[in-house]
Image: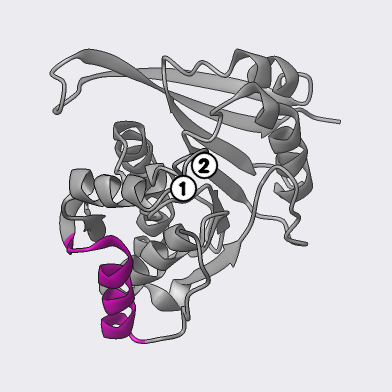
Amino acid sequence: MSKEYPLDASLEELLALARTEFGPVCFEDVRLGSVELKLLQIEDMPRYLESLVSRTRPGESVDLPLWAKIWPPCLILGMFLQRHPFAPGAEILEVGAGGGLCGLVAAARGFSVTLTDMEPSALLFCRINALKNGLAERVRLQHADFTRDRLGRRFQAIVGCEVLYNDAVYAPFLEFLQAHLAEEPGAEVFLGLDEKRTGKGFFALAQEDFRLLRKDVPYQDRETGESTVTCLYRLERKPA
């Protein structure tokens, strides 16, 4: 159930709200190079999902909390961002932030970051994570649906992980990037996605205005043991 949260409350108060909404929660340690983070997780996801289904009326769809999971492509994109030489003073936007892993990596490096998501519960987790890691002063939160909203600002870098989830978002997301990526040289978009979600339609549209670079990163999934690939993309505006 989505709701608005008092994100200016204390860490202890927000954790109490999270426990009321999701049951037991815990912090998972994540280390990406020199950056160490503690990220809030739902402690017993199967139990929470069971309670979620039990509260759903017949005929209603279950809104799964996919934003709450630390997805492998986000870890790999976060590792890349931990090393990337952003320009001094760069302002960074993360779209579909979930718990904010990638944006918090940039904040831990000293950059100003705006975390956005369309799910209020995701922003609750982002705020808790920012407070827990002592990064609140560098992190701004904003509710935003990148298929329709505009923030009225431009950023030197835009980051997104697993945001190309269906064909319907491709054109609106590209328009969002055009409206929010800074126009100066060096401004880039960084995307991470599982190879199974190729986003071919999006990149076919994007290549008209952006220079695309792709790097495939193979890894073994710890949960399934399967070998898979994360695709990292960098998009830079083509010269006018």
* Residues packed near mark 1 inside 10 Å, few (<14), some (14 to 19) or many (20 plus): few
Which span of residues is magenta-colored? 10-26
Observer-nearest of 144 and 37: 144
Residue drawn where x is 27% and y is 78% of the image: 16
Residue 54 visible, this orientation? yes
* Residue that badge 2 annotates: 60
Q: Position of residue 90 (x, y in %)?
A: 56, 58
In this rendering, does residue 133 appear at all?
A: no
The amino acid at mark 2 is Glu
Name the residue rendered at 59%, 38% in the picture: 189
Colour scheme of the rendered structure: one colour
Q: Position of residue 149 (x, y in %)?
A: 74, 53
Image quarter in which the C terminus is found: top right
Local secondary structure at mark 1: loop
**Numbered circle sitting on residue 112:** none
Q: Name the secondary structure under disc 2.
A: loop
The one of 85 and 179 positioned closer to us in this rendering: 179
The numbered disc on residue 57 is 1
